Image: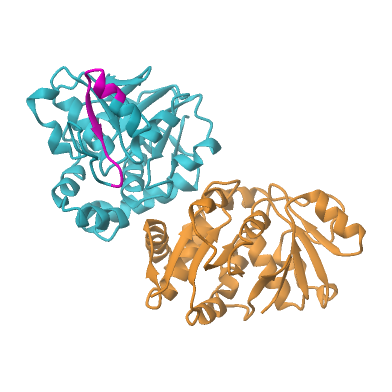
Chain colours: A orange, B cyan
Amino acid sequence: MQKIDVCYSPELLHLYNIENSIVVVVDVFRATSCMTTAFAHGVEGIIPVATVDECVNYQQQGYLAAAERDGKTPEGFDFDNSPFSYMVEKVKGATICVTTTNGTLAITKSKTAVKVMIGSFLNLGALTKYLKDVQYDVLVLCAGWKGKPNLEDTLFAGALVENLKNEFMIEDDSALMALRQYENAKSDLLSYVATSSHVKRLQRLGIQKDIAFCLQQDLYDVLPVLRGNTLVKM
Amino acid sequence: MQKIDVCYSPELLHLYNIENSIVVVVDVFRATSCMTTAFAHGVEGIIPVATVDECVNYQQQGYLAAAERDGKTPEGFDFDNSPFSYMVEKVKGATICVTTTNGTLAITKSKTAVKVMIGSFLNLGALTKYLKDVQYDVLVLCAGWKGKPNLEDTLFAGALVENLKNEFMIEDDSALMALRQYENAKSDLLSYVATSSHVKRLQRLGIQKDIAFCLQQDLYDVLPVLRGNTLVKM
């Protein structure tokens, strides 16, 4: 029986053997929710990069570019880190270069895995359906906040563990704790996350609308996956 | 208002600023439960060291010595890693050198803190009473299992957060998640931890008695604290 486990932070990823695993990277608020939304609206590819400088370089080569640091968008980029900014005509067929505080680092750190997939509540159902039949272990990698665990990514991990618990063995306490946290929260995710640190941070930035949007389940039937250095639709 | 936070693993400790904090190190199964029990039975001092070799060196200098690796005791030591082995006459007035898989590393990594204290369910009440009046931030450092978070240490952290939540501000999601996990578990801790990875590991080693013992609250009114390289009673 394959195993499912959860890593609460990219800072702990070296403790996990990902060479034979599918890694699902999640950054609910908001990187992986944005990516899921972008693919659902016709984006061709997303290039995740670690630094704002790299992102600017891609932009100068003619790519569309999106950047976020500390929840805000630096000047001069084509998108901010809101899923709503990807619901526009210009994304169709485009390849976009993206850097964010936590999410893109989690993706670039996972490159040695069998497959790197993008997870969010928005494509939870599609992910569940796909992963039920795979022959590899699954590790959910929470992007967290600057290396520290966070509530919303842990809840997504718990949701995926719940959906896959009949097909996969729960490997360790991190997965078990995420599952129990989600079981507690699932009847009203929005209230449950309302006291979390990142939601408070986002509320200060005035983006409550994004929070509610990113907690919706199964809105999009897309499976973004990393091919080389670029995320594409599977 | 002072802040209380929780660090799930020594591997994440570099993300926390502990220079102005009191760090409470917890390794419920079983290092810090053993230490609490030892002080309650008259031990004078405990020297935590990182390696089995260092521990042997102290033993050769005439100290009593205790070692644990992967839940088992290597040959030739005076105590194993069970709290019951410290309920003996020979501990009175003795200084014991100890090394364990997770707990002693967590202690030695915390040395730059204002104060390093030893926490376990056995001395939760004494710790709560002391910490209510301190003028520093508090960080609960979970020893975890080989760098990964575990359930029982997270539950202890949640218990301490619950006890101190009127006096301290809850700093971050890690503390919030530990609190909620504990609120869920507290009516029956023993059942709640029964499915955890470490309890399964310990059950394979035949030490169910230790598990039940280590989950008892407020058994001992002792506050072990690090002075230099040695834990002493405060």
Q: Is residue A187 magenta?
A: no
* x and y percentages locating residue A80 in the rendered image: 77, 58
Rendered position, B185 above or below A117: above
At 66% from the left edge and 54% from the top edge, which residue is drawn? A105
Residue A169 in sight here = yes
Nearest the camera: A104 or B219? Answer: A104
* x and y percentages locating residue A59 in the rendered image: 88, 59
Q: Is residue B16 left or right of residue B111?
A: right
Q: Is residue B69 magenta?
A: yes
* x and y percentages locating residue B140 in the rendered image: 40, 37
Look at the image and give the residue range highlighted in magenta: B57-70
Nearest the camera: B177 or A226? Answer: A226
Q: Is residue B21 left or right of residue A26?
A: left
Rendered position, A103 above or below B175: below
At 48% from the left edge and 62% from the top edge, which residue is drawn? A155
Quarter residue B102 falls in: top left
At 13% from the left edge and 38% from the top edge, which residue is drawn? B84
